[in-house]
Image: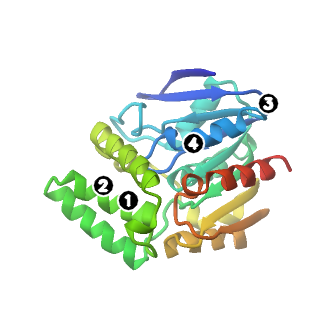
């Protein structure tokens, strides 16, 4: 196991590497951090070189001080770790970064595993997410951090089709802790200062082999993105996981690891 920090332009990224073999890089969801991949690091390290890192403005990485690109940070990480090519596994905002990276650096990507992914320049239409986003903005304006965090958990852990009591409370607690840490440490800089592509318009350009996973209880926007990738990407397979919303790997850890390894081993 190796842990460290690498320099990127105007910042640093905290990372961890385990195992040996073909590289697999895990990209966490927005406002979360690399701790969300604890189980997957254990599952992967006996078969692959497993890498996880905190994106800029998240976890233990540095807070942005100017405009930056998450996908260029990933390129710098791969260069520093001497990884010429890798499979990318990204959940939500991590999938969004992985797709932008694959469009910018297609020769560096072996396969893509996109879990409850978004796409850069996507439009939010789901009424539940719009309602919670409004409440989040109101909570932020009055400085009510617990209420703001609750809105994020409602959107991206519970989802629009479940009450909080329907969800594993340990999963809710873990996500709440990571969200709180990122917001209190970085104040949203990982989002407000990032530049992205318009991947929503370029899905057909994706060349790697792709597995898209989506929970059947997730936001309609995320379900639509999964369908679009399956329809437009050149080599895509979609799996709908029943009984979960956005945090597929945290709610169904053993099943997720099995599906991930099966795909990577193909």
- Helix or strand or loop: what does disc 4 sit on? helix
**Residue 259 position in % (x across, y down):** 74, 55
Inter-mark Cα distance, 3 to 2? 38 Å
Residue sticking out furthest to the right: 266
The residue labelled by disc 1 is: 153
Q: Are marks 1 and 2 in contact (CB under 8 Å)?
A: yes
Inter-mark Cα distance, 1 to 2? 6 Å
- Helix or strand or loop: what does disc 2 sit on? helix
Of marks 1 and 4, which one's residue comes earlier in the chain? 4
Left or right for 99, reference 262 = left
The residue labelled by disc 4 is: 37
Inter-mark Cα distance, 1 to 3? 36 Å
- Helix or strand or loop: what does disc 3 sit on? loop
The residue labelled by disc 3 is: 21
- Helix or strand or loop: what does disc 1 sit on? helix
Residue drawn where x is 61% and y is 47% of the image? 101
Q: Are marks 1 and 4 in contact (CB under 8 Å)?
A: no
Of marks 1 and 3, which one's residue comes earlier in the chain? 3
Q: Which mark is on residue 149?
A: 2
Q: In the rendered image, is residue 261 in sight?
A: yes
Of marks 4 and 3, which one's residue comes earlier in the chain? 3
Question: Where is 15 relative to 145, above or below?
Answer: above
Residue drawn where x is 67% and y is 45% of the image? 88
Rate crowding at label 2 as few (under 14), some (14 to 19) or many (20 or more) other CA atoms within 10 Å: many
Quadrant location of residue 66? Answer: top left
Q: Quadrant of the N terminus?
A: top right
**Residue 154 position in % (x across, y down):** 37, 64
Rate crowding at label 1 as few (under 14), some (14 to 19) or many (20 or more) other CA atoms within 10 Å: some
């Amino acid at each position: 196991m190796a842990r460290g920090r690498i320099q990127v332009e105007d910042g640093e990224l905290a990372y961890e590497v385990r195992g040996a073999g073909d590289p697999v890089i895990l990209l966490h969801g927005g406002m979360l951090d690399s701790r969300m991949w604890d189980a997957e690091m254990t599952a992967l390290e006996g078969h692959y070189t497993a890498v996880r890192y905190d994106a800029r403005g998240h976890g233990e990485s540095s807070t942005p001080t100017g405009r930056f690109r998450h996908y260029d940070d990933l390129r710098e990480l791969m260069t520093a770790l001497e990884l010429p090519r890798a499979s990318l596994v990204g959940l939500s905002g991590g999938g969004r970064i992985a797709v932008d990276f694959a469009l910018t650096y297609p020769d560096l990507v072996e396969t893509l595993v996109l879990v409850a992914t978004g796409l850069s320049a996507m439009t939010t239409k789901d009424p539940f997410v719009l309602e919670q986003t409004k409440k989040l903005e109101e909570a932020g304006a009055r400085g009510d951090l617990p209420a703001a965090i609750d809105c994020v958990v409602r959107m991206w852990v519970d989802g629009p089709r479940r009450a909080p009591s329907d969800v594993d409370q340990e999963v809710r607690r873990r996500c709440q802790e990571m969200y709180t840490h990122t917001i209190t440490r970085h104040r949203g800089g990982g989002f407000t200062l990032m530049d992205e592509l318009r991947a929503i318009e370029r899905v057909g350009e994706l060349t790697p082999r792709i597995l898209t996973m989506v929970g059947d209880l997730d936001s309609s926007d995320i379900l639509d993105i999964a369908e679009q990738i399956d329809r437009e990407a050149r080599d895509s397979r979609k799996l709908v996981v029943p009984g979960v919303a956005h945090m597929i790997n945290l709610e169904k850890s053993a099943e997720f690891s099995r599906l991930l390894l099966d795909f990577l081993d193909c």
